[in-house]
Amino acid sequence: MQNRALILKLFSAFALCLTWEIAGRVPVSYAFPTFFESMSALAEMTADGRLFDAYAETLRPLIIGISISAFVGIIVGLWVGLSPLFDWLFSPIFIVMQAAPLAALIPLLVLAYGIGLTSKVIVVCIMAMPVIVLSTSGAVKNTPESLKEMGEAFLASRLSVISRIILPAASPVIFAGLRLGVSAGFIGAILAELKITPTGVGDIITYSRSIADYPSMYAAIFSIIVLSVLFLNLLDKVEIILFKGNQRGYVSD
């Protein structure tokens, strides 16, 4: 089954690259290079170190922002899911954050916090945290009451019910929220570099577009997609390690 899934993923990747190559040769647009031209530019940027230097800048606000969003988001999501009062107080805030047009807020963030690291971290948090909070709170609220009652019947403490029943039962949805939050965080990090200060991978994209070096521009975008996919696969592995077998998901399923 795992081999079949791997084959399907490889086939999907091959089909995507083939479509990209064909679209570049047609061409769909003069600004759309072929897959091989983009990969050649990617290899060149990797060889001369530009890509590593760019990611050294991009990953700083991304890692800090996602770490803060995951830690605070899961804790706040637990409180919101367990307490009707916290649900009433905080859920509307995160719903508004999720719906707010971030591009319109960036000038306000720059005015308040400048063009440094702080503004970029806040952009990543605004993108990632609402998804994590709302997913976690929804998962906690939807944990079957029968599981909680069973824990209470065995005289388990409130902390034990949360750590041994609610969190394992809610883990699939929580990790789904984390994956969505990480994806949103990547978007936020690149958006911050494009809108606040042209640094990191965002600088490569902006500069390559300005000089019509489209293979380099698409190579930088492709590298972001690959890195985000690898990060999401890492989250899958962490989830499997933390919640093995019957400890993961609803026990009644």
Image: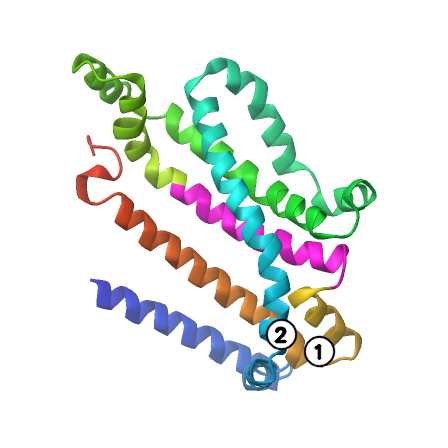
Outermost left residue: 154
Q: Which of marks 1 and 2 is nearer the N terminus?
A: 1
Q: Quadrant of residue 15?
A: bottom left
Where does residue 93 sit, x and y in percent of width and height?
62, 27
In the rendered structure, which segment of residues is drawn in magenta?
Answer: 175-198
Quickly name the residue at label 2. Answer: 218
Is 175 positioned to the left or the right of 242 in the image?
A: right
Q: What secondary structure is marked by label 2?
A: helix
User: At 38% across and 58% down in the image, what residue appears?
Assistant: 233
Q: Is residue 223 magenta?
A: no
Residue 50 image position (x, y, % from top left): 63, 77
- Regarding residue 28, the answer to whether it shows in the image is no
Depicted 78 relative to depicted 31: above or below: above
Mark 1–mark 2 Cα distance, whole angstroms, equals 10 Å
Q: Quadrant of the N terminus?
A: bottom left
Query: Which residue is denoted by mark 1 in the rendering?
Result: 31
Q: In the image, is residue 58 above or below residue 111?
A: below
Give the left or right position of residue 152, taking residue 50 as reference. left
Residue in view at x 49 percent, y 47 percent: 180
Q: Which SS does the magenta portion mostly show?
A: helix
Q: Nearer the viewer, residue 121 or 250?
A: 121
Q: What type is the residue that disc 2 sits on?
A: Tyr
